[in-house]
Image (tube, grey):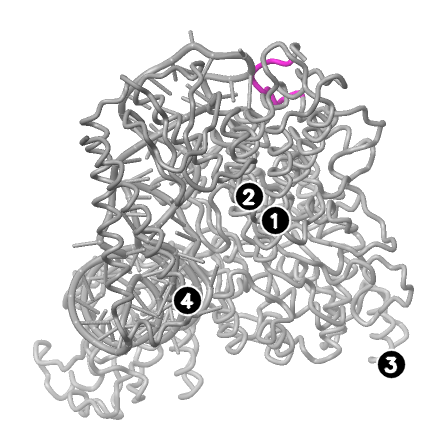
RNA sequence: GGGAGCUUAGCUCAGCUGGUUUAGAGCAUCUGCCUUACAAGCAGAGGGUCGGGGGUUCGAGCCCCUCAGCUCCCACCA
């Protein structure tokens, strides 16, 4: 195989095998008699592009699904995309704006046509990118949250919840995004600390002017606020009833600055006298707490903002100006009017829209809500009772806290791109919720007893549903859109077979957005949990620990990385250090390490393929020993890798295989069985090696699918359609013969020691040496040592008579290399003395331990026995070293 | 303001119910080597008073207390 280059070049190989897998439909799954292993992809935004978070996430998923497939399960990884209502709509609005088109100038239908066009043009790019990574998704099952079937399930679920009384409509204080001009759920608001200001404003007492007469003597109070632009919505000022400073205000009225509206002074314990001046302005329309005070005291609600964050007519002043601009202007104008006492720097938390990053405005509006507390009960129990397992488990606490304090979910969005709320308003008031307009009409006729009603009399709700109201059905709807009170009896139904899915891999950021709600939906509409295990990945960060983001520009382009290091190399780079729940500090050098590993595998394959096997050659003992040893070692590694996978410790599983391949297989095994120069290899060793290599490839395949397929295909003649990806993982050995491993370990240490001596004394590896051994040296170890350290003869001695030796100890066995004049007596003595000092010190600590009566009496027997063994070994070593030193002195 | 977690070699992390010689790995570093699979490699080597302090125990990286630093989640203090 001299035609193979010394460097692995992945590009064509990746393309070739991905096409091959697709052509033979190896990713596709249909229900059969095998045990199912299903997994649903966290659907990326339909018009999104791949970022490093996706790379990590999907690499993990692909490893899991490929391994499951190779364990003989019927693996099905369902891909798809999310319509991402607000994000996509924002992009389309932006695109239209560039073309000079305003959304408000378009009809709903026309806008949706643009949105669909955008989706067709940019949609699915991300799925193509996932193919480059090697993702073994069942592309024939690609799903989309706005597809016809999926949409039907979303609408059914809405109707079902409405009929159960779990969906209601009402005016509530919601999070308003003035940029997207829609309501958001609490989860879509991100609170961040902001450097702001605290403004101290003067509110004059209403009747004081009359009594005091002079302007200067007018009584006033100072109110501290971070939002002076909201004073036009003030309808009261509140103080704590126990606050002595403000007793005089009881029953009085105050004048709101600039607009001179009279508002009452109210008293409530909610106000903290310690904060600011202990005087709180109450703006029920624009603050949730103020709203509650307003409810309690029957205050007027004055909404001074338009939907886009500018001031409305109700504000009286600054009408049409933006809220932040007004904040600056009000400060100036208040100061000019002598109504601003002072301004202090102040840090406070402000809510921002997760999508548009606009500052959230609390706003009273009519919205649709889901009553969550009852729905959440089984979902909470599922995680608490370990029916659904979270990895790492620390998220259990967070999950419980959230579920126990769950609030009603605002599901209506003032957007067009999404599932339109299936509610129709009747001409004379009232509404009907139904799956279709036709059904709504039928119900409406019945309800109104008016058979003359037509479709055009009904007006459908303008709002659409929160994206998460569709994605919470993902593990159900991708298999069957007939959810919600429409259970299918057919047992061959995909949902019956694949549900519940096995693993879900996602980011902790969407634990509540998505994971918790999927569990809720699972219990509500599919009769149980949607997945057994949830693997929560970390966040991909750059070297400085910053989160990778578009704004910072610190995120490498995944496709460029794949082109540079190969998909397998990048996959390894993502996995070499990424324990569940911990952040991944990403560094390109990790991909380089991955690429280097691919190259290592590639070259060991070149070596093996270059060998000629001959029946005439007998199997040398050292080769027999190596084969025996390596099989045991693979067996042992398999057990621990399986254990790693059970615990979702993928990095550790990979590292074990990495070391097994690089250090043990390439470094020791292949070196041990290498035939002598110019000679053929014996048939037995050759076949064993091919089979071992085959097993190694299969073990590595879930992590690095492309190179393993390429080499596996070249290892033997394969039929068209055959593939490593549908082969089985090597069998797991039930028992490991530790003595075989121990013997080889001894051989390795002897070899390493001899190499050290050679290096130290400048003895070429080609020069054969004699080895004297005093103590136990297994024949297996001897065979390997002779082969790898170029030992021409091994002599067992009772006592070393030759002083001119280099010596070393492996466990309790003493080894000597007679080197004659090469031995520097002084140096050798120094070395022995250092060893002696070490063992004496060690022996001393062991003896001290054993001399401690309390230790001997209270420590368990096996621990004490172990210490005794340490003592014996150390004593033997000390004796041996002293003996050697004596000889050197003689 | 509440809650959770983290702090072990230059970097990233293992270290399972306290006991396996003097605490491990990968990468990086240093020293030799182009040794006929691989310099994207081979052979060797160095590197840590386990964040500080105190305690429990025959025995602590692991348990308890305390201090310091970092991170995340939740929360309506203007």
Depth check, front residue: B66 or A641:
A641
Name the mark on residue A449. Answer: 3
Q: Of the residues tagged 3 and 2, which is closer to the observer? A: 2
Identify the residue under disc 1: A737
Q: Please, is residue A652 above or below residue A382 in the view?
A: above
Q: Give the CA distance from mark 1 to mark 4.
A: 80 Å
Identify the residue under disc 4: A304
Depth check, front residue: A418 or A604:
A604
The image position of residue B7, as x and y in percent, is 31, 55
Q: Of the residues tagged 4 and 2, which is closer to the observer? A: 2
Q: Same chain for marks 1 and 3?
A: yes
The quarter of the picture where residue A337 lies is bottom left
Depth check, front residue: A629 or B53:
A629
Query: Crowding near pointer 1: few (<14 within 10 Å), some, many (20+)?
Result: few
Chain at numbered mark 4? A
* Precedes in sequence: disc 1 or disc 4: 4
Chain at numbered mark 1? A
Identify the residue under disc 2: A741
* Precedes in sequence: disc 4 or disc 2: 4
Q: Which residues are magenta?
A: A4-12
């Amino acid at each position: 195989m001299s035609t193979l280059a010394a460097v692995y070049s992945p590009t064509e190989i990746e393309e070739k095998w991905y096409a091959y897998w697709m052509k033979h439909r190896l990713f596709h799954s249909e229900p059969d008699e095998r045990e199912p292993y299903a997994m649903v992809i966290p659907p990326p935004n339909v018009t999104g592009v791949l970022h490093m978070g996706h790379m990590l996430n999907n690499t993990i998923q692909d490893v899991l699904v490929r391994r499951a497939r190779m364990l003989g399960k019927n693996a099905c990884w369902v891909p798809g995309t999310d319509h991402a209502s607000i994000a996509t709509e924002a992009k389309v609005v932006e695109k239209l704006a560039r073309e000079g088109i305003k959304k408000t100038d378009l009809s709903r239908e026309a806008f949706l046509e643009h949105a669909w066009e955008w989706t067709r043009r940019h949609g699915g790019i991300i799925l193509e990118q996932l193919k480059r990574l090697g993702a073994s998704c069942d592309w024939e099952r690609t799903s989309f949250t706005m597809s016809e079937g999926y949409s039907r399930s979303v609408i059914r679920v809405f109707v079902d919840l409405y009929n159960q009384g779990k969906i209601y409509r009402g005016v509530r204080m919601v999070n308003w995004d003035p940029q997207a001009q829609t309501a958001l759920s609490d989860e879509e608001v991100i609170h961040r600390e902001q450097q702001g200001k605290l403004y101290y404003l003067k509110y004059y007492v209403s009747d004081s002017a009359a009594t005091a007469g002079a302007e200067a003597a007018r009584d006033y109070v100072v109110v501290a606020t971070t939002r002076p632009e909201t004073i036009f919505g003030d309808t009261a000022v509140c103080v704590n009833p126990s606050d002595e400073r403000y007793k005089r205000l009881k029953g009085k009225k105050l004048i709101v600055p600039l607009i001179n509206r009279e508002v009452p002074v109210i008293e409530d314990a909610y106000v903290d006298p310690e904060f600011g001046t202990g005087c709180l302005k109450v703006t029920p329309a624009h603050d949730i707490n103020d709203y509650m005070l307003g409810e309690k005291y029957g205050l007027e609600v004055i909404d001074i903002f338009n939907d886009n964050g500018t001031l409305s007519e109700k504000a009286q002043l600054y009408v049409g100006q933006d809220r932040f601009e007004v904040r600056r202007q009000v400060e100036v104008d208040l100061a000019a009017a002598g109504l601003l006492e002072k301004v202090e720097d102040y840090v406070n938390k402000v809510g921002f829209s997760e999508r548009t990053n606009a500052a959230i405005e609390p706003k009273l509006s009519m919205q649709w809500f889901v009553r969550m507390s009852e729905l959440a009960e089984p979902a909470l129990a599922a995680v608490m009772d370990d029916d659904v397992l979270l990895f790492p488990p620390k998220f259990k606490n967070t999950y419980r806290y959230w579920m126990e304090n769950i609030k009603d979910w605002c599901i209506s969005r003032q957007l067009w791109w999404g599932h339109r709320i299936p509610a129709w308003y009747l001409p004379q008031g009232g509404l009907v919720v139904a799956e279709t307009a036709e059904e709504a009409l039928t119900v409406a006729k019945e309800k109104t007893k008016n058979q003359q009603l037509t479709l055009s009399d009904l007006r459908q709700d303008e709002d659409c549903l929160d994206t998460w109201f569709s994605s919470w059905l993902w593990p159900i709807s991708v298999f069957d859109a007939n959810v919600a009170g429409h259970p299918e009896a057919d047992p061959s139904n995909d949902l019956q077979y694949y549900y519940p899915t096995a693993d879900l891999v996602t980011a902790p950021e969407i634990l509540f957005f998505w994971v918790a709600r999927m569990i809720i939906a699972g219990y509500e509409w599919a009769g149980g949990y949607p997945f057994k295990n949830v693997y929560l990945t970390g966040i991909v960060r750059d070297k400085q620990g910053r989160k990778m983001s578009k704004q910072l520009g610190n995120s490498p382009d995944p496709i460029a990385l794949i082109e540079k290091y190969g998909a397998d190399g990048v996959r390894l780079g993502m996995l070499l250090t990424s324990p569940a729940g911990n952040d991944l500090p990403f560094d390109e050098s990790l991909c380089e390490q991955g690429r280097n590993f691919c190259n290592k595998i590639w070259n060991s394959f070149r070596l093996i393929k270059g060998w000629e096997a001959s029946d005439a050659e007998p199997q040398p003992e050292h080769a027999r020993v190596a084969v025996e040893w390596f099989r045991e070692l693979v067996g042992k590694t398999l057990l621990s890798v399986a254990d790693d996978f059970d615990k979702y410790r993928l990095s550790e599983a990979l590292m074990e295989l990495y070391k097994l391949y690089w250090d043990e297989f390439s470094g020791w095994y292949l070196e041990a069985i290498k035939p002598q120069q110019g000679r053929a290899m014996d048939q037995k060793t050759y076949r064993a090696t091919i089979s071992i290599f085959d097993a190694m490839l299969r073990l590595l395949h879930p992590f690095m699918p492309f190179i393993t397929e390429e080499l596996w295909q070249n290892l033997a003649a394969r039929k068209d359609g055959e593939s490593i990806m549908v082969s089985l993982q090597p069998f797991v050995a039930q028992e490991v013969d530790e003595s075989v491993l121990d013997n080889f370990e001894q051989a390795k240490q002897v070899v390493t020691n001899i190499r050290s001596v050679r290096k130290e004394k400048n003895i070429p590896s080609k020069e054969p040496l004699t080895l004297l051994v005093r103590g136990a040296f297994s024949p297996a170890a001897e065979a390997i040592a002779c082969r790898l350290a170029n030992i021409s003869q091994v002599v067992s001695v009772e006592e070393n008579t030759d002083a001119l030796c280099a010596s070393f100890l492996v466990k309790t066995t003493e080894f000597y290399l007679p080197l004659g004049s090469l031995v520097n007596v002084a140096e050798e003595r120094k070395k022995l003395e250092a060893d002696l000092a070490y063992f004496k010190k060690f022996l001393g600590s062991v003896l001290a331990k054993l001399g401690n009566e309390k230790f001997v009496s209270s420590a368990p027997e096996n621990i004490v026995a172990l210490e005794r063994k340490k003592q014996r070994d150390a004593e033997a070593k000390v004796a041996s070293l002293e003996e050697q030193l004596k000889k050197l002195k003689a």
